[in-house]
Amino acid sequence: MNRLIVVSNRVTLAQPSSAGGLAIALSAALAQRGGLWMGWSGQQTDDKSPAPLAISTVGKITYALTDLTQKDLEEYYQGFANRVLWPICHYRLDLAEYERKEMSGYFRVNRFFAERLASLVQEGDLVWVHDYHLIPLAAELRRAGLRNRLGFFLHIPWPPPDVFFAMPVHAEILKSLCSYDVVGFQTKYDVENFLGCLHRSGLARHVGGIITTTEGKSLRVGAYPIGIDTARFSTLAAQSATSRPLRKAAESLRGRDLIVGADRLDYSKGITQRIDAFERFIRSEKHMQGKVTYLQITPKSRSEVPEYEAMQRVVAEQAGRVNGELGTLDWVPIRYINRSVPHNLLSGLYRLSKVGLVTPLRDGMNLVAKEYVAAQSEDDPGVLVLSAFAGAARELDGAIKVNPYDVEGIAQALSTALTMSLEERRERWRSMYDHLLEHDVQHWCEWFLDDLEVPPLQ
Ligand code: F6P
Protein backbone atom coordinates (compact mmCIF):
# COMPACT_ATOMS: atom_id res chain seq x y z
CA MET A 1 0.00 0.00 0.00
CA ASN A 2 1.31 3.46 -0.86
CA ARG A 3 2.14 5.75 2.02
CA LEU A 4 -0.51 8.38 2.69
CA ILE A 5 0.42 12.00 3.37
CA VAL A 6 -2.41 14.19 4.61
CA VAL A 7 -2.01 17.97 4.63
CA SER A 8 -4.39 20.35 6.40
CA ASN A 9 -4.10 23.68 8.10
CA ARG A 10 -5.56 22.41 11.38
CA VAL A 11 -4.02 19.28 12.89
CA THR A 12 -5.02 17.53 16.08
CA LEU A 13 -2.59 15.37 18.04
CA ALA A 14 -3.83 12.07 19.52
CA GLN A 15 -7.50 11.59 20.47
CA PRO A 16 -9.42 14.78 19.89
CA SER A 17 -11.78 15.83 22.67
CA SER A 18 -13.09 19.08 21.32
CA ALA A 19 -11.48 19.33 17.88
CA GLY A 20 -13.42 20.47 14.80
CA GLY A 21 -15.01 18.17 12.24
CA LEU A 22 -12.13 18.09 9.79
CA ALA A 23 -9.55 17.24 12.43
CA ILE A 24 -11.72 14.49 13.93
CA ALA A 25 -12.38 12.91 10.54
CA LEU A 26 -8.72 13.00 9.51
CA SER A 27 -7.46 11.51 12.76
CA ALA A 28 -9.99 8.68 12.43
CA ALA A 29 -8.95 8.06 8.83
CA LEU A 30 -5.22 8.12 9.56
CA ALA A 31 -5.44 6.10 12.79
CA GLN A 32 -6.42 3.04 10.77
CA ARG A 33 -4.15 3.31 7.72
CA GLY A 34 -1.26 5.22 9.25
CA GLY A 35 0.79 7.84 7.44
CA LEU A 36 2.15 11.32 7.70
CA TRP A 37 0.08 14.36 8.67
CA MET A 38 1.48 17.78 7.88
CA GLY A 39 0.03 21.10 8.93
CA TRP A 40 0.18 24.14 11.13
CA SER A 41 1.31 23.54 14.72
CA GLY A 42 -1.28 25.96 16.09
CA GLN A 43 1.65 28.12 17.31
CA GLN A 44 2.54 31.62 16.21
CA THR A 45 6.23 32.46 16.14
CA ASP A 46 7.78 35.92 16.42
CA ASP A 47 10.74 34.82 14.30
CA LYS A 48 10.83 35.98 10.70
CA SER A 49 11.40 32.43 9.48
CA PRO A 50 9.90 29.62 11.56
CA ALA A 51 12.02 26.73 12.92
CA PRO A 52 12.27 23.48 10.92
CA LEU A 53 9.28 21.13 10.94
CA ALA A 54 8.62 19.48 14.30
CA ILE A 55 8.37 15.73 13.67
CA SER A 56 6.77 13.35 16.17
CA THR A 57 5.02 9.98 16.01
CA VAL A 58 1.92 8.90 17.90
CA GLY A 59 0.65 5.39 17.11
CA LYS A 60 0.62 4.94 13.35
CA ILE A 61 0.70 8.66 12.59
CA THR A 62 3.80 10.77 12.08
CA TYR A 63 3.13 14.46 12.52
CA ALA A 64 5.13 17.14 10.72
CA LEU A 65 4.12 20.52 12.09
CA THR A 66 5.20 24.02 11.27
CA ASP A 67 4.76 27.25 13.19
CA LEU A 68 3.58 30.31 11.28
CA THR A 69 4.50 33.95 11.78
CA GLN A 70 1.98 36.57 12.88
CA LYS A 71 2.10 38.11 9.40
CA ASP A 72 1.44 34.68 7.83
CA LEU A 73 -1.56 34.06 10.07
CA GLU A 74 -2.99 37.52 9.54
CA GLU A 75 -2.74 37.35 5.78
CA TYR A 76 -3.28 33.67 5.00
CA TYR A 77 -5.60 32.36 7.75
CA GLN A 78 -7.49 35.34 9.21
CA GLY A 79 -7.19 37.20 5.93
CA PHE A 80 -7.70 35.50 2.59
CA ALA A 81 -8.88 32.08 3.86
CA ASN A 82 -11.40 33.35 6.39
CA ARG A 83 -12.35 36.80 5.03
CA VAL A 84 -12.55 35.91 1.35
CA LEU A 85 -12.75 32.19 0.61
CA TRP A 86 -14.93 31.28 3.60
CA PRO A 87 -17.65 33.92 2.99
CA ILE A 88 -17.57 33.40 -0.80
CA CYS A 89 -17.94 29.63 -0.47
CA HIS A 90 -20.83 30.20 1.95
CA TYR A 91 -22.57 32.51 -0.55
CA ARG A 92 -21.83 35.63 1.54
CA LEU A 93 -20.48 38.10 -1.01
CA ASP A 94 -21.55 40.88 1.35
CA LEU A 95 -19.01 39.77 3.98
CA ALA A 96 -16.00 39.23 1.74
CA GLU A 97 -13.14 41.72 2.33
CA TYR A 98 -10.48 41.72 -0.37
CA GLU A 99 -6.98 42.92 0.38
CA ARG A 100 -4.26 42.36 -2.20
CA LYS A 101 -1.68 42.00 0.56
CA GLU A 102 -3.68 39.12 2.08
CA MET A 103 -4.18 37.40 -1.25
CA SER A 104 -0.45 37.37 -1.88
CA GLY A 105 0.12 36.22 1.72
CA TYR A 106 -2.19 33.26 1.05
CA PHE A 107 -0.17 32.17 -1.98
CA ARG A 108 3.11 32.81 -0.13
CA VAL A 109 2.16 30.59 2.81
CA ASN A 110 1.05 27.84 0.42
CA ARG A 111 4.47 28.01 -1.24
CA PHE A 112 6.07 27.80 2.20
CA PHE A 113 3.99 24.67 3.05
CA ALA A 114 4.92 23.14 -0.31
CA GLU A 115 8.65 23.75 0.16
CA ARG A 116 8.56 22.08 3.57
CA LEU A 117 6.42 19.20 2.37
CA ALA A 118 8.45 18.51 -0.78
CA SER A 119 11.44 17.44 1.30
CA LEU A 120 9.31 14.73 3.00
CA VAL A 121 7.57 13.24 -0.03
CA GLN A 122 8.92 9.99 -1.45
CA GLU A 123 8.17 8.29 -4.75
CA GLY A 124 4.78 6.56 -4.69
CA ASP A 125 3.39 8.57 -1.74
CA LEU A 126 -0.22 9.66 -2.11
CA VAL A 127 -0.70 13.27 -1.07
CA TRP A 128 -4.18 14.25 0.11
CA VAL A 129 -4.70 17.98 0.75
CA HIS A 130 -7.67 19.27 2.74
CA ASP A 131 -9.76 22.39 2.62
CA TYR A 132 -9.79 25.94 1.39
CA HIS A 133 -6.64 27.10 3.17
CA LEU A 134 -4.42 25.02 0.91
CA ILE A 135 -5.91 25.14 -2.60
CA PRO A 136 -2.65 26.32 -4.31
CA LEU A 137 -0.53 23.59 -2.69
CA ALA A 138 -0.55 21.19 -5.66
CA ALA A 139 0.52 23.86 -8.13
CA GLU A 140 3.44 24.72 -5.84
CA LEU A 141 4.37 21.05 -5.39
CA ARG A 142 4.32 20.52 -9.16
CA ARG A 143 6.53 23.56 -9.55
CA ALA A 144 8.96 21.92 -7.12
CA GLY A 145 9.05 18.90 -9.47
CA LEU A 146 6.74 16.45 -7.66
CA ARG A 147 5.04 13.86 -9.87
CA ASN A 148 3.09 12.01 -7.15
CA ARG A 149 -0.68 11.58 -7.26
CA LEU A 150 -2.20 14.63 -5.56
CA GLY A 151 -5.77 14.78 -4.27
CA PHE A 152 -7.79 17.63 -2.81
CA PHE A 153 -10.96 17.52 -0.72
CA LEU A 154 -13.03 20.61 0.04
CA HIS A 155 -14.90 20.36 3.34
CA ILE A 156 -17.01 23.47 2.72
CA PRO A 157 -19.50 24.25 -0.08
CA TRP A 158 -18.49 25.37 -3.56
CA PRO A 159 -20.65 28.28 -4.75
CA PRO A 160 -22.33 28.82 -8.14
CA PRO A 161 -20.28 30.60 -10.85
CA ASP A 162 -21.96 34.00 -10.38
CA VAL A 163 -20.88 34.06 -6.74
CA PHE A 164 -17.44 32.58 -7.29
CA PHE A 165 -16.54 34.89 -10.16
CA ALA A 166 -17.10 37.94 -7.95
CA MET A 167 -13.85 37.05 -6.20
CA PRO A 168 -10.71 38.68 -7.53
CA VAL A 169 -8.12 35.95 -8.29
CA HIS A 170 -10.89 33.46 -9.06
CA ALA A 171 -8.92 32.36 -12.14
CA GLU A 172 -5.78 31.59 -10.10
CA ILE A 173 -7.81 29.60 -7.57
CA LEU A 174 -9.52 27.55 -10.29
CA LYS A 175 -6.26 27.00 -12.13
CA SER A 176 -4.62 25.83 -8.91
CA LEU A 177 -7.29 23.18 -8.48
CA CYS A 178 -6.53 21.87 -11.96
CA SER A 179 -3.04 20.85 -10.74
CA TYR A 180 -4.54 18.03 -8.64
CA ASP A 181 -5.38 14.56 -10.00
CA VAL A 182 -8.61 14.25 -8.01
CA VAL A 183 -10.74 17.07 -6.60
CA GLY A 184 -13.51 16.00 -4.22
CA PHE A 185 -16.53 17.86 -2.87
CA GLN A 186 -19.19 17.08 -0.28
CA THR A 187 -22.21 16.90 -2.59
CA LYS A 188 -23.12 16.66 -6.24
CA TYR A 189 -24.43 20.25 -6.08
CA ASP A 190 -20.93 21.46 -5.20
CA VAL A 191 -19.57 19.40 -8.09
CA GLU A 192 -22.09 20.96 -10.47
CA ASN A 193 -21.16 24.44 -9.27
CA PHE A 194 -17.45 23.71 -9.69
CA LEU A 195 -17.89 22.27 -13.18
CA GLY A 196 -19.95 25.34 -14.06
CA CYS A 197 -17.02 27.52 -12.97
CA LEU A 198 -14.50 25.45 -14.96
CA HIS A 199 -16.60 25.61 -18.10
CA ARG A 200 -17.26 29.30 -17.84
CA SER A 201 -13.58 30.04 -17.32
CA GLY A 202 -12.60 27.90 -20.32
CA LEU A 203 -9.97 26.12 -18.21
CA ALA A 204 -11.19 22.61 -18.92
CA ARG A 205 -13.31 20.47 -21.22
CA HIS A 206 -15.61 17.75 -19.99
CA VAL A 207 -15.86 14.78 -22.31
CA GLY A 208 -17.43 11.44 -21.39
CA GLY A 209 -17.06 11.84 -17.64
CA ILE A 210 -13.40 12.93 -17.80
CA ILE A 211 -12.26 16.49 -17.44
CA THR A 212 -9.29 17.58 -19.49
CA THR A 213 -7.58 20.82 -18.63
CA THR A 214 -6.36 23.22 -21.29
CA GLU A 215 -2.86 21.92 -20.48
CA GLY A 216 -3.95 18.42 -21.53
CA LYS A 217 -4.01 16.94 -18.02
CA SER A 218 -6.96 14.81 -16.89
CA LEU A 219 -8.74 15.64 -13.69
CA ARG A 220 -11.24 13.53 -11.77
CA VAL A 221 -13.94 15.53 -10.01
CA GLY A 222 -16.51 13.90 -7.76
CA ALA A 223 -18.74 14.05 -4.70
CA TYR A 224 -17.41 12.13 -1.69
CA PRO A 225 -19.71 13.01 1.24
CA ILE A 226 -17.65 12.78 4.43
CA GLY A 227 -18.75 10.38 7.17
CA ILE A 228 -18.11 10.06 10.89
CA ASP A 229 -16.84 7.21 13.04
CA THR A 230 -20.45 6.11 13.55
CA ALA A 231 -19.96 2.98 15.68
CA ARG A 232 -17.44 4.71 17.93
CA PHE A 233 -19.63 7.77 18.46
CA SER A 234 -22.62 5.58 19.24
CA THR A 235 -20.64 3.66 21.91
CA LEU A 236 -19.29 6.94 23.30
CA ALA A 237 -22.84 8.29 23.67
CA ALA A 238 -24.08 5.13 25.40
CA GLN A 239 -21.19 5.29 27.88
CA SER A 240 -21.49 9.01 28.42
CA ALA A 241 -25.24 8.83 29.08
CA THR A 242 -24.63 7.00 32.37
CA SER A 243 -21.69 9.18 33.47
CA ARG A 244 -21.93 11.47 36.50
CA PRO A 245 -21.91 14.80 34.59
CA LEU A 246 -24.70 13.55 32.36
CA ARG A 247 -26.78 12.30 35.27
CA LYS A 248 -26.39 15.74 36.86
CA ALA A 249 -27.37 17.44 33.60
CA ALA A 250 -30.45 15.20 33.33
CA GLU A 251 -31.47 15.95 36.93
CA SER A 252 -31.14 19.67 36.33
CA LEU A 253 -33.73 19.46 33.55
CA ARG A 254 -36.40 18.29 36.04
CA GLY A 255 -38.28 16.35 33.40
CA ARG A 256 -38.22 19.12 30.79
CA ASP A 257 -37.65 18.22 27.15
CA LEU A 258 -34.20 19.16 25.88
CA ILE A 259 -33.51 20.75 22.51
CA VAL A 260 -29.80 20.87 21.69
CA GLY A 261 -27.73 22.88 19.21
CA ALA A 262 -23.92 22.73 18.92
CA ASP A 263 -21.98 24.89 16.48
CA ARG A 264 -18.80 26.90 16.29
CA LEU A 265 -19.66 30.58 16.65
CA ASP A 266 -19.93 31.28 12.94
CA TYR A 267 -22.32 33.40 10.87
CA SER A 268 -22.84 30.48 8.51
CA LYS A 269 -24.46 28.40 11.24
CA GLY A 270 -27.75 30.31 11.46
CA ILE A 271 -27.57 30.66 15.24
CA THR A 272 -29.42 33.97 15.51
CA GLN A 273 -32.28 32.78 13.26
CA ARG A 274 -32.45 29.60 15.36
CA ILE A 275 -32.76 31.52 18.64
CA ASP A 276 -35.48 33.63 17.01
CA ALA A 277 -37.26 30.42 16.03
CA PHE A 278 -37.06 28.99 19.53
CA GLU A 279 -38.41 32.27 20.93
CA ARG A 280 -41.27 32.21 18.44
CA PHE A 281 -42.03 28.60 19.37
CA ILE A 282 -42.31 29.23 23.09
CA ARG A 283 -44.25 32.46 22.60
CA SER A 284 -46.78 30.81 20.30
CA GLU A 285 -47.08 27.48 22.14
CA LYS A 286 -47.67 28.88 25.61
CA HIS A 287 -48.30 25.45 27.13
CA MET A 288 -44.62 24.64 26.39
CA GLN A 289 -43.37 27.50 28.58
CA GLY A 290 -41.51 25.97 31.51
CA LYS A 291 -41.57 22.55 29.83
CA VAL A 292 -38.70 22.78 27.40
CA THR A 293 -35.04 23.82 27.62
CA TYR A 294 -32.90 24.82 24.66
CA LEU A 295 -29.19 24.20 25.17
CA GLN A 296 -26.95 25.98 22.69
CA ILE A 297 -23.26 25.06 22.87
CA THR A 298 -21.17 27.50 20.89
CA PRO A 299 -17.40 27.53 21.24
CA LYS A 300 -15.67 30.73 20.21
CA SER A 301 -14.09 30.54 16.80
CA ARG A 302 -11.76 32.71 14.68
CA SER A 303 -12.21 35.56 17.17
CA GLU A 304 -9.50 37.68 15.50
CA VAL A 305 -11.75 38.02 12.43
CA PRO A 306 -14.02 41.09 12.93
CA GLU A 307 -17.25 39.42 11.69
CA TYR A 308 -16.80 36.66 14.29
CA GLU A 309 -15.97 39.07 17.09
CA ALA A 310 -19.17 41.02 16.35
CA MET A 311 -21.26 37.87 16.38
CA GLN A 312 -19.99 36.96 19.82
CA ARG A 313 -21.82 39.98 21.24
CA VAL A 314 -24.96 39.54 19.16
CA VAL A 315 -25.63 35.94 20.20
CA ALA A 316 -24.89 36.56 23.89
CA GLU A 317 -27.25 39.56 23.91
CA GLN A 318 -29.96 37.67 22.06
CA ALA A 319 -29.91 34.67 24.44
CA GLY A 320 -29.86 37.05 27.42
CA ARG A 321 -32.83 39.03 26.09
CA VAL A 322 -34.98 35.93 25.52
CA ASN A 323 -34.17 34.61 28.99
CA GLY A 324 -34.86 38.02 30.51
CA GLU A 325 -38.24 38.35 28.82
CA LEU A 326 -39.51 34.77 29.09
CA GLY A 327 -37.62 33.11 31.95
CA THR A 328 -39.27 32.57 35.31
CA LEU A 329 -38.04 31.98 38.85
CA ASP A 330 -37.49 28.29 38.15
CA TRP A 331 -37.05 28.14 34.34
CA VAL A 332 -34.27 29.42 32.09
CA PRO A 333 -35.48 28.88 28.49
CA ILE A 334 -32.03 29.05 26.83
CA ARG A 335 -28.87 27.66 28.36
CA TYR A 336 -26.05 29.23 26.41
CA ILE A 337 -22.55 27.80 26.74
CA ASN A 338 -19.96 29.91 24.95
CA ARG A 339 -17.01 27.49 25.07
CA SER A 340 -16.23 24.01 23.85
CA VAL A 341 -17.57 20.92 25.57
CA PRO A 342 -15.59 17.64 25.35
CA HIS A 343 -16.77 15.32 22.64
CA ASN A 344 -17.83 12.52 25.01
CA LEU A 345 -20.07 14.86 27.03
CA LEU A 346 -21.53 16.24 23.84
CA SER A 347 -22.43 12.73 22.67
CA GLY A 348 -24.26 12.08 25.97
CA LEU A 349 -26.13 15.39 25.72
CA TYR A 350 -27.29 14.51 22.21
CA ARG A 351 -28.60 11.21 23.53
CA LEU A 352 -30.38 12.89 26.42
CA SER A 353 -32.17 15.37 24.18
CA LYS A 354 -35.50 15.15 22.37
CA VAL A 355 -34.46 17.32 19.44
CA GLY A 356 -31.17 18.12 17.67
CA LEU A 357 -31.50 21.54 16.07
CA VAL A 358 -29.01 21.96 13.21
CA THR A 359 -29.90 24.91 11.00
CA PRO A 360 -26.89 26.31 9.13
CA LEU A 361 -27.62 28.88 6.44
CA ARG A 362 -25.09 27.02 4.29
CA ASP A 363 -22.81 24.14 5.23
CA GLY A 364 -20.52 21.78 3.33
CA MET A 365 -21.70 18.74 5.29
CA ASN A 366 -22.30 19.43 9.01
CA LEU A 367 -20.99 16.58 11.07
CA VAL A 368 -23.00 17.58 14.15
CA ALA A 369 -26.11 16.38 12.29
CA LYS A 370 -24.51 12.99 11.67
CA GLU A 371 -23.19 12.72 15.22
CA TYR A 372 -26.60 13.60 16.59
CA VAL A 373 -28.12 10.61 14.77
CA ALA A 374 -25.26 8.29 15.80
CA ALA A 375 -25.73 9.23 19.46
CA GLN A 376 -29.40 8.16 19.65
CA SER A 377 -30.64 4.86 21.05
CA GLU A 378 -33.39 2.82 19.43
CA ASP A 379 -35.39 2.84 22.72
CA ASP A 380 -36.13 6.53 22.57
CA PRO A 381 -34.46 8.32 19.65
CA GLY A 382 -34.43 12.10 19.42
CA VAL A 383 -35.54 13.91 16.26
CA LEU A 384 -33.13 15.76 13.98
CA VAL A 385 -34.36 19.13 12.67
CA LEU A 386 -31.99 19.90 9.82
CA SER A 387 -31.36 22.76 7.42
CA ALA A 388 -32.05 21.88 3.80
CA PHE A 389 -28.87 23.85 2.97
CA ALA A 390 -26.46 21.55 4.82
CA GLY A 391 -24.71 18.85 2.78
CA ALA A 392 -25.96 16.31 5.35
CA ALA A 393 -29.56 16.99 4.23
CA ARG A 394 -28.79 15.13 0.96
CA GLU A 395 -28.23 11.94 2.93
CA LEU A 396 -30.31 12.16 6.12
CA ASP A 397 -33.79 11.48 4.82
CA GLY A 398 -35.28 10.84 8.25
CA ALA A 399 -34.63 14.41 9.45
CA ILE A 400 -37.29 17.12 9.49
CA LYS A 401 -35.91 19.47 6.86
CA VAL A 402 -36.27 23.21 7.33
CA ASN A 403 -35.39 26.39 5.51
CA PRO A 404 -33.00 28.03 8.01
CA TYR A 405 -34.15 31.54 7.00
CA ASP A 406 -37.79 30.65 7.75
CA VAL A 407 -38.10 31.35 11.46
CA GLU A 408 -41.78 30.37 11.54
CA GLY A 409 -41.03 27.12 9.70
CA ILE A 410 -38.35 26.15 12.24
CA ALA A 411 -40.73 26.94 15.12
CA GLN A 412 -43.32 24.69 13.48
CA ALA A 413 -40.71 21.91 13.04
CA LEU A 414 -39.87 22.12 16.75
CA SER A 415 -43.49 21.56 17.59
CA THR A 416 -43.71 18.58 15.18
CA ALA A 417 -40.50 17.07 16.57
CA LEU A 418 -41.52 17.37 20.21
CA THR A 419 -44.88 15.68 19.62
CA MET A 420 -43.75 12.94 17.21
CA SER A 421 -44.79 9.39 18.07
CA LEU A 422 -42.16 6.90 19.21
CA GLU A 423 -42.91 4.70 16.21
CA GLU A 424 -42.23 7.49 13.73
CA ARG A 425 -39.11 8.59 15.57
CA ARG A 426 -37.74 5.05 15.46
CA GLU A 427 -38.50 4.63 11.79
CA ARG A 428 -36.85 7.93 10.84
CA TRP A 429 -33.82 7.25 13.03
CA ARG A 430 -33.25 3.65 11.84
CA SER A 431 -32.92 4.57 8.16
CA MET A 432 -30.46 7.38 8.96
CA TYR A 433 -28.41 5.29 11.39
CA ASP A 434 -28.06 2.38 8.96
CA HIS A 435 -26.91 4.77 6.27
CA LEU A 436 -24.31 6.31 8.60
CA LEU A 437 -22.99 2.91 9.67
CA GLU A 438 -22.38 1.97 6.07
CA HIS A 439 -21.08 5.37 4.95
CA ASP A 440 -18.70 6.05 7.80
CA VAL A 441 -15.39 7.90 7.80
CA GLN A 442 -13.39 4.81 6.80
CA HIS A 443 -15.66 4.28 3.82
CA TRP A 444 -15.14 7.94 2.83
CA CYS A 445 -11.39 7.64 3.14
CA GLU A 446 -11.14 4.41 1.12
CA TRP A 447 -13.48 5.72 -1.55
CA PHE A 448 -11.42 8.87 -2.13
CA LEU A 449 -8.06 7.12 -1.93
CA ASP A 450 -9.15 4.36 -4.33
CA ASP A 451 -9.93 7.04 -6.89
CA LEU A 452 -6.69 8.85 -6.16
CA GLU A 453 -4.61 5.71 -6.57
CA VAL A 454 -5.97 4.84 -10.00
CA PRO A 455 -5.26 7.23 -12.86
CA PRO A 456 -8.44 7.77 -14.97
CA LEU A 457 -8.53 6.23 -18.44
CA GLN A 458 -7.58 8.82 -21.04
O1 F6P B 1 -15.82 23.63 8.07
C1 F6P B 1 -14.49 23.73 7.79
C2 F6P B 1 -13.65 23.48 9.01
O2 F6P B 1 -12.34 23.21 8.59
C3 F6P B 1 -14.18 22.35 9.85
O3 F6P B 1 -13.89 21.14 9.31
C4 F6P B 1 -13.59 22.64 11.16
O4 F6P B 1 -14.33 22.12 12.20
C5 F6P B 1 -13.58 24.12 11.22
O5 F6P B 1 -13.61 24.57 9.89
C6 F6P B 1 -12.39 24.63 11.99
O6 F6P B 1 -12.10 25.94 11.73
P1 F6P B 1 -10.73 26.58 12.18
O7 F6P B 1 -9.63 25.66 11.75
O8 F6P B 1 -10.69 27.92 11.52
O9 F6P B 1 -10.79 26.67 13.67
Image (spheres, rainbow, N blue to C red):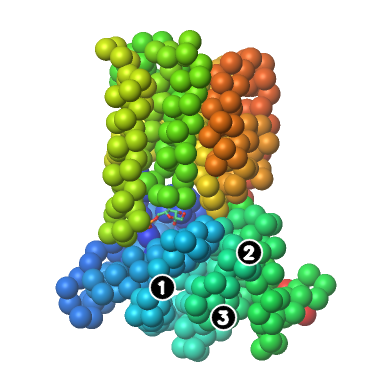
Label 1 environment density (alpha carbons within 10 Å; few <14, some 14–19, many ≥20) = some
Q: Is residue 95 left or right of residue 427?
A: left
Residue tagged 1: 98
Amino acid carrying label 2: it is: Pro
Residue nearest the viewer, comparing 60 with 131: 131
Counting residues from the start of the chain, the first of labels 1 and 3 encountered is 1
Amino acid carrying label 3: it is: Ala
Q: Position of residue 99 (x, y in %)?
A: 37, 76
The answer, for residue 139, to whether it is visible in the render is yes
Q: Are marks 2 and 3 in contact (CB under 8 Å)?
A: no
Quarter of the image for the N terminus: give it. Answer: bottom right
- Residue 171, label in figure: 3
Relative to 116, does residue 4 appear above or below in the rendering? above
Q: Is residue 446 left or right of residue 243?
A: right
Calculate the distance from the C-alpha at mark 1 to the C-alpha at mark 2. Answer: 19 Å
Calculate the distance from the C-alpha at mark 1 to the C-alpha at mark 3. Answer: 15 Å
Quarter of the rendered image showing ligand 1: bottom left
Instruction: Give the residue displayed 62% in from the left and 68% down from the top.
Output: 162
Mark 1 residue's CB less than 8 Å from ligand 1: no
